[in-house]
Image (cartoon, coloured by chain):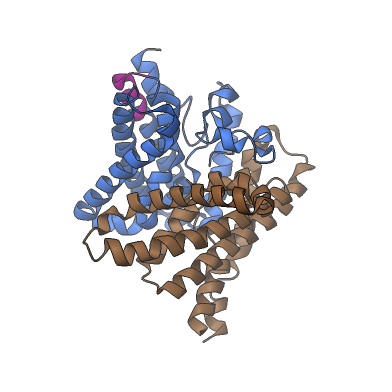
């Protein structure tokens, strides 16, 4: 149980996907301008990350590894994720239109998001058990959510600031991301010591 | 456009990282040291050249509706090959690039060039374009890695630099330093870059996901260059 909590908290704070592992930077910079779209995008990421892990983990251990096909991991995972996202979109559209309305537009964007493919591959390389892998995906998704929501707040402050011409747009956003990421460095070592 | 222009535009005028702002994740993550940057640049360039050539050769065969899945499968195939080669011949590089080697599959530069260039141009032009873009990616990575390694670690390609090694700014090699150096470099390009590329050349129009992206709460309109999946 302690191990699961450590995995969850480390994934959210210490190894934050966006701010310390540099996965999923594009949506982080692109969709964080407004709070509501940042929340929508992050919820979709959490959902797809867990779903993708639940789908790819058994494929790796029951299909690829026993048959010596481990080298097909990259191709199989990206295809499974792409197909899965399409399927989920169709199912949501038909049966839960309200959820589709709020998450739907973000789903296709996530297909080629490196955070989702990243979490499924990392779960295998870290040789987690199925439960640990699911917890890790949940934590990674929550970490993404936290970073997105925090950063959309930071960006709304930048909006009104007086910035030099050449720093307008992306450069100032990156510098702000740097400071946000600096604050996450403070979590290093905290989680391990909590349970030591 | 002649071949020379095709080759050189990727280097400076349309540099994929600093001007088009594609492939930010590997740029930030693997620019901690010059050797990593060279390895990542070479791996991505090889994948880009192979995928551009094959996609351009098959551009009349692949049906328009399923082109993106086709491209992804082709790219994933080449990435797997590169992954196996690196594992076999440069295990140290495989270890330090880690997750970012398989993640070349979802690198926007490769899918972006397939969509923007290879599916409309001849095989030879696409190959030249891929070499230029790959070199531009590598150049930007090495530039960033040089700044981060020289000032952050006091070394260059592992060799110690006398004065700087005593005054390391270690934060530069960590995550915040990555964002910071990247931000400063893009600001420098904005300041000194003479050629303002037309917005419609890249960003949303060129993004393979432009169709779905437009629906995403109008985020795209405001920062075209930033939304690149």
Residue toward you, B211 or B127: B211
Residue toward you, B175 or B101: B101
Q: Where is residue B107 in the image (x, y as percent from the top left)?
A: 43, 42
Task: Identify by letter the chain in blue.
Answer: B
Q: Is residue B129 magenta?
A: yes
Q: In which quarter of the image is residue B154?
A: bottom left
In the picture, measured across the screen, residue B95 lies left or right of residue A81, that is left
Q: Position of residue B158 (x, y in %)?
A: 33, 54
Q: For the stretch drawn in magenta, what is the main secondary structure?
A: helix
- Given the current orientation, which residue lies at the most extreme top position? B1
Q: In which quarter of the image is residue B213?
A: top right
Magenta residues, start to end: B121-130
Residue under the point 58% across and 37% down: B212
Residue toward you, B26 or B111: B111
In the picture, measured across the screen, residue A4 lies left or right of residue B73, that is right
Residue toward you, B149 or A6: A6
Task: Identify by letter the chain in brown.
Answer: A
Q: Position of residue B53 (x, y in %)?
A: 29, 28
Q: Position of residue B3 (x, y in %)?
A: 34, 16
- Given the current orientation, which residue lies at the most extreme front position? A95
> Is there any visible trace of residue B158 in the rendered image?
no
Residue under the point 34% across and 41% down: B73
Q: Quadrant of residue B221?
A: top right
> Is there any visible trace of residue B51 in the rendered image?
yes
Q: Does the magenta stretch include residue B58?
A: no
């Amino acid at each position: 149980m302690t191990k699961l909590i450590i995995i969850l908290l480390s994934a959210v704070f210490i190894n934050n996907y966006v701010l310390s592992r540099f996965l999923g930077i594009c949506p982080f910079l692109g969709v964080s301008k407004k709070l509501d779209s940042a929340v929508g995008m992050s919820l979709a990421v959490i959902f797809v990350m867990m779903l993708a892990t639940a789908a790819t983990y058994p494929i790796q251990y029951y299909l690829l590894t026993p048959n010596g096909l481990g080298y097909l991991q990259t191709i199989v995972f990206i295809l499974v994720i792409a197909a899965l996202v399409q399927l989920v979109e169709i199912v949501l559209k038909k049966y839960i239109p309200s959820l589709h309305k709020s998450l739907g537009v973000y789903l296709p964007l996530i297909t080629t998001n490196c955070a989702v493919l990243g979490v499924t591959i990392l779960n295998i390389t870290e040789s987690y058990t199925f439960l640990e892998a699911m917890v890790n995906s949940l934590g990674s998704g929550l970490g993404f959510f936290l970073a997105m929501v925090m950063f959309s707040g930071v960006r709304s402050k930048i909006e009104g600031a007086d910035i030099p011409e050449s720093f307008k747009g992306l450069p100032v956003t990156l510098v702000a991301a740097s400071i946000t990421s600096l604050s996450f460095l403070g979590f290093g070592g905290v989680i391990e010591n909590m349970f030591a | 456009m002649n071949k020379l222009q095709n080759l050189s535009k990727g280097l400076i005028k349309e540099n994929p990282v600093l001007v088009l702002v594609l492939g930010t994740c590997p740029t930030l993550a693997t620019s901690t040291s010059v050797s990593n940057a060279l390895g990542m640049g070479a791996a991505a360039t090889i994948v880009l050249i192979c995928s551009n050539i094959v996609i351009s050769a098959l551009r009349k065969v692949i049906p328009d509706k399923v082109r993106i899945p086709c491209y992804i499968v082709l790219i994933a195939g080449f990435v797997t090959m590169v992954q196996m080669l690196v594992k076999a011949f440069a295990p140290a590089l495989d270890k330090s690039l880690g997750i970012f080697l398989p993640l070349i599959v979802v690198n926007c530069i490769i899918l972006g060039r397939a969509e923007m260039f290879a599916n409309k141009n001849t095989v030879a032009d696409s190959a030249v374009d891929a070499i230029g873009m790959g070199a531009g990616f590598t150049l930007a990575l090495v530039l960033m890695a040089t700044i981060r390694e020289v000032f952050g670690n006091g070394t260059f390609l592992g060799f110690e630099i006398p004065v700087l090694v005593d005054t390391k700014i270690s934060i530069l090699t960590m995550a915040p330093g990555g964002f910071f150096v990247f931000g400063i470099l893009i600001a420098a390009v904005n300041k000194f870059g003479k050629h303002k590329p037309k917005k419609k050349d890249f960003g949303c129009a060129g993004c393979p996901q432009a169709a779905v992206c437009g629906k995403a709460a109008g985020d795209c309109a405001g920062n075209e260059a930033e939304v690149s999946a």
